[in-house]
Amino acid sequence: MIKVTIFNEYAHERLKEDVKAIYPKGIHGQLASFLADDDIEVRTTTLFNEDGSFVPECGLTEEVLKDTDVIIWWGHCHHNDVPDEVADRVVNQILCGMGAIFLHSGHHSKPFKKLMGTTCNLLWRDDEKERLWNINPAHPIMAGIGDYIDLPEEEMYGERFEIPTPDDVLMIGTYGSHEVFRSACTWQRVNGKIFYFQPGHETYPTYHNPEIQRIIKNGVRWAAPTYRAEKLICPHFEKLPF
Ligand code: ZN
């Protein structure tokens, strides 16, 4: 069983009617609805409660994270409201081996920026359509995906995306005025597998698209740990007989 924890900011869906109409149970609720499966167990947590108060520690305690195989992260306007202590805890568990999927505006989240070590800046513009080209069909995350996916509505994210060179680039997004973007990228940091996937602006029904759902689900199975350290240490090592 792969244990998934979905973390969502949960601001737009509470406060904006147009977003609430697309995601009445929140983006976390929508992600959970298609991810749960025979081999995937899902729990969700948020930055905000329904009434706008903060969820203590974002619901991401040490205990929860140690019991999580893959964390999924969606955030946008409130990255700075995630306490540093929580972000550090998440990063540490990823380095130990917990898998991580950062969606859309999660490119500016504290854990993602800490893992990348760069600005993670990009170009952006609303009200676009996107064609996502599958440039790595043999990668497990691309299993079952055709040559391209068309999204009639999505936010443009364009290069340059200020990230360290990914281990693999799986998709290139293209938009109306020929911008391009590395829309699906993977990295490994110590033991943890990391997947960044660009689509998912809150005012468009991207997470209702079956192909987008399939990629995120493939991503969960790919990112699940094959090895996980209890903690990361730098020990003195006695010489072995040789
Ligand atoms: Zn967006």
Image (tube, helix red, strand yellow):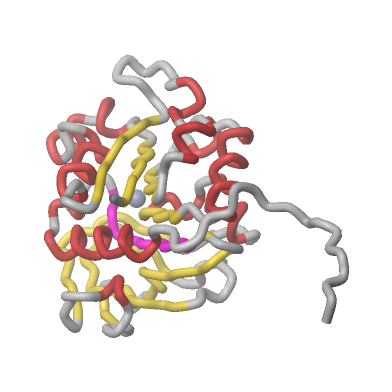
Range shown magenta = 193-201
Q: Is residue 129 above or below residue 50?
A: below
User: Which residue sits at x=21%, y=50%?
Assistant: 35
- Left or right of 31? Residue 100 is right
| Location of residue 43 in the rendering, given as x and y in whole percent from the top left corner | 30, 36
Quadrant for residue 47, please give it: top left
Magenta span has 137?
no
User: Which residue sits at x=31%, y=73%?
Assistant: 173
Q: Nearer the viewer, residue 110 or 62?
A: 62
- Left or right of 226? Residue 23 is left
| Location of residue 131 in the rendering, given as x and y in whole percent from the top left corner | 23, 74
- Left or right of 139? Residue 68 is right
Q: Nearer the viewer, residue 197 or 137?
A: 137
Q: Quadrant of the C terminus?
A: bottom right
Numbered disc total: 0
Q: Nearer the viewer, residue 18 or 48?
A: 48
Q: Residue furthest front?
A: 241
- Left or right of 160? Residue 1 is left
User: Which residue sits at x=46%, y=72%?
Assistant: 159
Magenta span has 194?
yes
| Location of residue 158 in the rendering, given as x and y in whole percent from the top left corner | 41, 68
User: Which residue sits at x=18%, y=32%?
Assistant: 25
Quadrant for residue 101, please give it: bottom left
| Location of residue 27 in the rendering, given as x and y in whole percent from the top left corner | 25, 40
